[in-house]
Amino acid sequence: MKKNYLLILSVLAMFSFNSAYSQFCPPTGFSDGSALYFFYSPGAAICDERPNMVSVGASEFSLTTCEPGYAIYTLTAGDALSNINIFVADFGVGTCEYTNGSLTQETLSISVVNQVIKSTRVFPNPLTAGNTIQLVFNENVKGKASMFDITGKKLLSIEIDNLRKKQVDVSSLTNGVYLIQIEAGSSIATKKVVIMK
């Protein structure tokens, strides 16, 4: 019964984190220079979850209209945008780059990357059968992971190329306790892994 409660709490925590950061970049964004127009996918963040202010460089835009499918931000400080075809909007949790209305790049802030890396889950852990473990992230991660034995000797190097889940082959490792270090940008987290096949 205790395991069931822990599983439910883990799922709820993961859901609340994902809902806070899922699709923080609307897939479509336009500007006429004095306003920003963002269009959201069906089922995206509701108005309460959208930021009240978005900045583009030194210019600030405040939320004036919010509907399920779109949001309009009006210039409240700074200059009107000189290039309306290419701009980078800062939503607070990260930046979103738009080119001719289409989202071209989405970058989470360092604090959000820290949360994603620190909330990495490793399973099965302990590994009692099979030869693979999974690293599961709350958001796509681009970085690397390294596996060490308890003496600090590096045994495996793994590239993580913009994935939410990475399978790691540990068939070359014997039973024991290991540390896996996950790095993305300047964020680092270390998790303990137990192999007992």
Image (cartoon, rainbow, N blue to C red):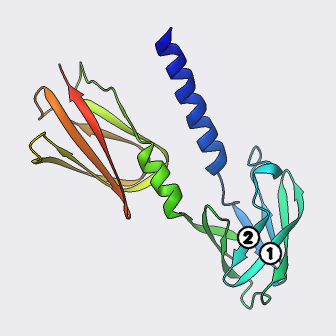
Residue at image location 49% in from the left, 50% down from the top: 115
Element marked by disc 1: strand
Residue at image location 85% in from the left, 83% down from the top: 34
Question: Residue 158, how many percent across, how many down?
Answer: 25, 50
Question: Residue 104, how many percent across, how many down?
Answer: 59, 69
Residue at image location 38% in from the left, 64% down from the top: 185
Left or right: where does residue 144 sit relative to residue 35? left
Left or right: where does residue 116 sit relative to residue 144? right
Question: Residue 176, how many percent across, how many down?
Answer: 14, 28
Kind of residue at disc 1: Phe
Element marked by disc 2: strand
Q: Residues within 10 Å of mark 1 (few under 14, many from 20)?
A: many
Say which quadrant the C terminus sits in: top left
The residue at which mark 1 appears reads as 61
Residue 79 can be seen, yes or no = yes
Say which quarter of the image contains residue 97.
Answer: bottom right
Kind of residue at disc 2: Val
Q: Earlier in the sequence, mark 2 or mark 1?
A: 2
Residue at image location 12% in from the left, 25% down from the top: 175
Residue 128: numbered disc = none
Residue 54: numbered disc = 2
Q: Disc 2, disc 1: CB below 8 Å?
A: yes
Q: Camera-side residue: 50 or 87? A: 50
